[in-house]
Amino acid sequence: MSEAAQALRDVYASMAELWCSPQDGDVEEVKGRAEEAIAGLEGIDQEGAALLSQFLKNPISEMEYVELFELDPRCPLYLGSHAFDEPETCAQAAVSDRNGYMIELLGIYRHFGMTPNGQELPDYLPLVVESLSLTAGSEDPVRKKLIEEYILPYLPPIRSRLEELKTPYLYLLDALERALKLDLGAGIKEVSHG
């Protein structure tokens, strides 16, 4: 695996953890891994590294996280929830567009030999980002399709909501978008260091 692919793998893994609740892991360990990922990212994307550093400088409490993303979330971390109407009945859920989106995401995960544990829906942002970490460096066109068709188009509504809420998670979203575009545009195996 190239140095750039390894850097993106580490950054995606770190971002997946950072999108999760602070109660889901040892905050200092997660921060340490993020700082290591930032150091690796600096060689290929200074601005992305700076955005991640800025996010780490603005920690939020567990209570703030819960208010933002859980229970009655102000900004759900489920990509499809920002793009598809929520069904009002079980019958509508079976034929909803979001359901089809999630089934397609599951198919992509299976294509790469991944089986989500079933604790979260397939469009849960940390899960989606973790899948990018596990497939970093792959030249499989399905990975490119995942980024172009199943992730990037679903981020603008999340961005709008995070901007409205004035949360530091906007730095994390900006860093994620930069990583995705770097991943696609540069073809991470071809990224130069200077």
Image (cartoon, helix red, strand yellow):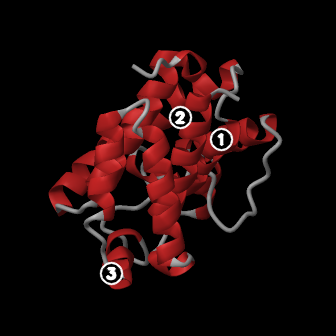
Image quarter of the C terminus: top left
Mark sitting on residue 61? 3
Instruction: State which tag comes first along the sequence, 1 or 3.
Output: 3
Mark sitting on residue 150? 2
Q: Quadrant of residue 64?
A: bottom left
Q: Residues within 10 Å of mark 2 (few under 14, many from 20)?
A: many
Instruction: State which tag comes first along the sequence, 1 or 2.
Output: 1
Instruction: State which tag comes first along the sequence, 2 or 3.
Output: 3
Type of amino acid under label 1: Leu
Q: Nearer the viewer, residue 139 or 84?
A: 139
Q: Nearer the viewer, residue 61 or 66?
A: 61
Mark sitting on residue 105? 1
Assign a secondary structure to mark 1.
Answer: helix
Type of amino acid under label 3: Ser
Assign a secondary structure to mark 2.
Answer: helix
Q: Position of residue 143 (x, y in %)?
A: 64, 28
Give the answer, above or below, for where 51 lies relative to 190. below
Tell me, yes or no, whether the two marked residues, 1 and 2, touch with CB atoms within 8 Å.
Answer: yes
* Nearer mark to the viewer, of 2 and 3: 3
Q: Position of residue 37 (x, y in %)?
A: 50, 49
Q: Position of residue 41 (x, y in %)?
A: 45, 39
- In the figure, is residue 51 to the left or right of 102? left
Q: Nearer the viewer, residue 94 or 46?
A: 46
Q: Nearer the viewer, residue 141 or 34?
A: 34
